Amino acid sequence: MYFTDKPIEDEEDFYDREQELRLLKEYSLKYSLTLVLGFRRTGKTSLIKVGLKGLKTIYIDMRKFEDKTAITYSNFLRELEKEINRKRGKWRNLMDYLKALKGVKIGELGIEFSLGRERTNLGDILDSLNEWAYSEGERLVLIIDEVQELIKMRGYNLLPVFAYSYDNLRNISFVFAGSKIGMVYRYLKTDEEDSPLFGRFVAKVELKPFNEDQGVDFLNKGFKQYGIEISEDRLREVTRRLGGIPGWLALYGLESVNSRRDALNEVVEKAFRLVSKEFCSFVRERGSRRYVELIKGLKLTGRWSELKRYLEIKEGNRITDAEITKLLTNLVYAGFVEKFNDEYRIVDPILRDNVDKIVC
Ligand SMILES: Nc1ncnc2c1ncn2[C@@H]1O[C@H](COP(=O)(O)OP(=O)(O)OP(=O)(O)O)[C@@H](O)[C@H]1O
Ligand SMILES: [Mg+2]
């Protein structure tokens, strides 16, 4: 069934994305580092789950740290530990490779990495995982979803370990996914000469929202699975209102099927509550109310100079060029706004159409 409210795991429930699926699988077996990029709710997590099914994978989700101001090395290691323990039953003799490492205990509940003075070294863990994968004649794909959250890690830098693995461990590859695309690059710094990952080749799979025809086809086929038929005109209108964003379309399908009527208005309301919560959490994290005014200004104009004037009028003060650029860049990096032909615009039509209602 196409309509669900969770990331999809099975190919039969996943609409289209054939090329992206093929590329992701090919890249993750061929290259050391692949990025899966796309705005929120475009289907990145689903693409990874469906596309890499059947391969040896470890999946770490950093989304739960989104609202935190800082992440520690221990947080990351605990997540890795949890995932390894989840695979323990299936992956014979993996523990044999890990148990010799410094600070590793194997108890009834599985493996435990030490976080104290003798803390387990991530490079050593990756070495052992690599050796294990080699012995299995397989490649282990280490997936980190919402990887940009790692930028908040304090007291430890994972990039040198990733670079070490990239250069030396032939049986491990990384797949990093992120919805805050600018932040992903800001974190990985592949373009900065003094960064550990500088100059490494990075494969990319990008997920765009569905175009109008795809959106209509997705909804049409999804409703047909429930024996429901809706006119093409209506599906076109819905796809347009929801910007072709797969997550919103699936939600519309699901709510309509469950309530047995067209649920567009409820879905728009629910979606708006969700995006405005996400936006306000960004505003809180950044600590500046200016983002709230600026996003409202974006409904009126997409031009840098007019946005500057708009904010100055709102505040009754002059604002520096650098400040405006910084605010807009941060909105772009966080995935709320995109820059197209030198104009800025709000990505998600749900946010765009309802921006006046935002109160953070
Ligand atoms: N190709 C698809 N076919 C069917 N449903 C899809 C497809 N792509 C996405 N969805 C639906 O959209 C929703 C969002 O998908 P998913 O969580 O994979 O996206 P995401 O890009 O990881 O989102 P986020 O940025 O919030 O992490 C899910 O409910 C999923 O079922
Ligand atoms: Mg996701």
Image: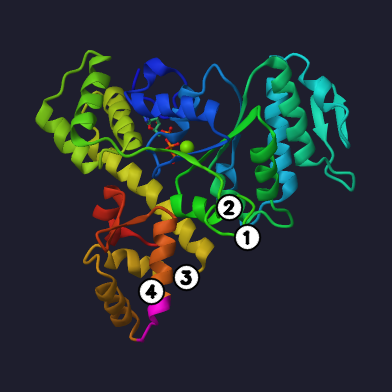
**In the displayed structure, does residue 278 sit left or right of residue 355?**
right
Residue at the disc numbered 4? 324
Give the vertical position of 88 relative to 297 (above or below). above
- Give the Cα distance between marks 1 and 4: 28 Å
**Residues tagged 2 and 1 counted as in contact (Cβ below 8 A):** yes
Residue at 68% from the left image edge and 48% from the top image edge: 158
- Give the Cα distance between marks 1 and 3: 31 Å
**In the displayed structure, does residue 293 sit left or right of residue 81?**
left
Q: What stretch is highlighted in magenta?
A: 317-322
Along the viewing direction, whichever of 196 and 63 lies nearer the viewer: 196
Mark 2 or mark 4: which comes first in sequence? 2
Mark 1 or mark 4: which comes first in sequence? 1
The amino acid beneath tag 4 is Ile
- Give the Cα distance between marks 3 and 4: 12 Å
Of helix, strand and loop, which one carries label 3? loop
- How many neighbours does mark 2 have within 10 angstroms: few (below 14), some (14-19), or many (20 or more)? some
**Residues tagged 2 and 4 counted as in contact (Cβ below 8 A):** no
Residue at 54% from the left image edge and 33% from the top image edge: 31
Residue at 41% from the left image edge and 64% from the top image edge: 329
Q: How many labels does the image show?
A: 4
- Give the Cα distance between marks 2 and 1: 7 Å
Residue at 15% from the left image edge and 37% from the top image edge: 237
Of helix, strand and loop, which one carries label 2? loop
Residue at the disc numbered 3? 288
Question: Which of the numbered marks, if any, corresponds to residue 194?
Answer: 1
Question: Which of the numbered marks, if any, corresponds to residue 101?
Answer: none
